[in-house]
């Protein structure tokens, strides 16, 4: 290689798709480093346990978005097969909302999100939001959870939304009086 040519940078040692981690300690250290590196996670009270690529996150975080991001950060590490998120959200006093305020904020977030269909509702109890209703697609169910996941005062989300693939079926909403019949070219047999 000529001196003027730049060499490709070495692969990031912590990310998937690069070198595989060799030992339990390597994976645990890599997950700890990724949590420390991630600006969206306060890793001060997170303890990482690894058993053959199954990583458990234990401890506390101060918000639900950090709860989600910690699991995502751990999953990015090479050698991690599964992440078991046992973190508890312990809200700072200034982020606490009573159940009525959190329920109202969650329902407003659902209403404002155009990808969440009418009929999906939220209720809160001790900072835990439960989503209920029926949607036609799994993407709508996930959109409802994303719509409330960033709320202040949220400790956890329980998604009890049911998926009914027939709820928004074109056949169930058809207003035409014509019924389906076999195409004219389809051979009919007399019986």
Image (cartoon, rainbow, N blue to C red):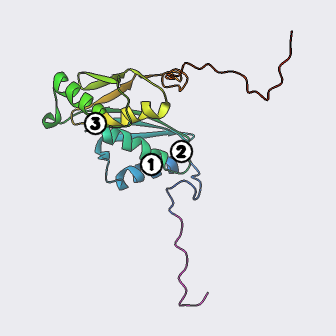
Q: Secondary structure at mark 1?
A: helix
Mark 3 or mark 1: name the one nearer the start of the chain. 1
Q: At 44% across and 48% down in the image, what residue appears? A: 31
Q: Position of residue 120 (x, y in %)?
A: 35, 24
Q: Is residue 162 left or right of residue 10?
A: left
Tell whether label 2 touches label 1 (CB within 8 Å). yes
Q: Looking at the image, which residue is at 53% across and 24% down?
A: 165
Q: Determine the secondary structure under disc 3.
A: helix
Q: How far across and how far down the image is residue 75, in percent?
A: 48, 45
Quarter where residue 56 is shown = top left
Per the image, the residue denoted by label 3 is 112
Q: Measure the C-alpha gap from mark 3 to mark 1.
A: 36 Å
Label number found at residue 31 = 1
Residue 80: give its label.
Answer: 2
Q: Position of residue 62 (x, y in %)?
A: 25, 39
Which of the marked residues, 1 or 2, is nearer the chain's N terminus?
A: 1
* 2 falls in the magenta region: yes
Label number found at residue 88: none
Q: Are marks 3 and 1 in contact (CB under 8 Å)?
A: no
Task: Kindly check if marks 3 and 2 are in contact, taking CB atoms under 8 A apart as contact.
Answer: no
Q: Which residues are magenta?
A: 1-11
Circle 2 — which element? loop
Number of the front mark, 3 or 2: 3
Q: Nearer the viewer, mark 3 or mark 1?
A: 3
Out of 55 and 105, give the one closest to the viewer: 105
The quadrant where residue 94 appears: top left
Q: Bin the neighbour count of mark 2 within 10 Å (Cα to Cα): few under 14, some 14-19, many 20 and up.
A: many
Viewport quadrant of the C terminus: top right
The residue most toward the top is: 191
Q: Is residue 110 left or right of residue 138?
A: left
Q: Is residue 125 left or right of residue 178?
A: left
């Amino acid at each position: 290689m000529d001196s003027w040519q730049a060499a490709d940078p070495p692969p990031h040692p912590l990310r998937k798709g690069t070198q595989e981690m060799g030992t339990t300690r390597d994976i645990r250290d890599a997950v700890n480093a990724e949590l420390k590196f991630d600006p969206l996670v306060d890793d001060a009270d997170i303890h990482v346990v690894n058993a053959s690529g199954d990583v458990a996150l234990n401890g506390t975080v101060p918000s639900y978005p950090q709860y989600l991001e910690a699991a995502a950060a751990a999953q990015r590490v090479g050698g991690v097969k599964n992440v078991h998120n046992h973190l508890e959200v312990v809200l700072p006093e200034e982020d606490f909302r009573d159940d009525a305020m959190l329920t109202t904020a969650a329902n407003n977030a659902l209403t404002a999100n155009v990808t969440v269909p009418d009929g999906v509702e939220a209720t809160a109890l001790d900072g835990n939001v439960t989503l209920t209703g029926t949607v036609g697609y799994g993407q709508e169910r996930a959109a409802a959870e994303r719509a409330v996941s960033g709320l202040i005062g949220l400790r956890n989300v329980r998604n009890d939304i049911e998926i009914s693939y027939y709820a928004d079926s074109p056949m169930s909403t058809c207003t035409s009086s014509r019924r389906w019949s076999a195409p004219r070219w389809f051979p009919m047999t007399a019986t």
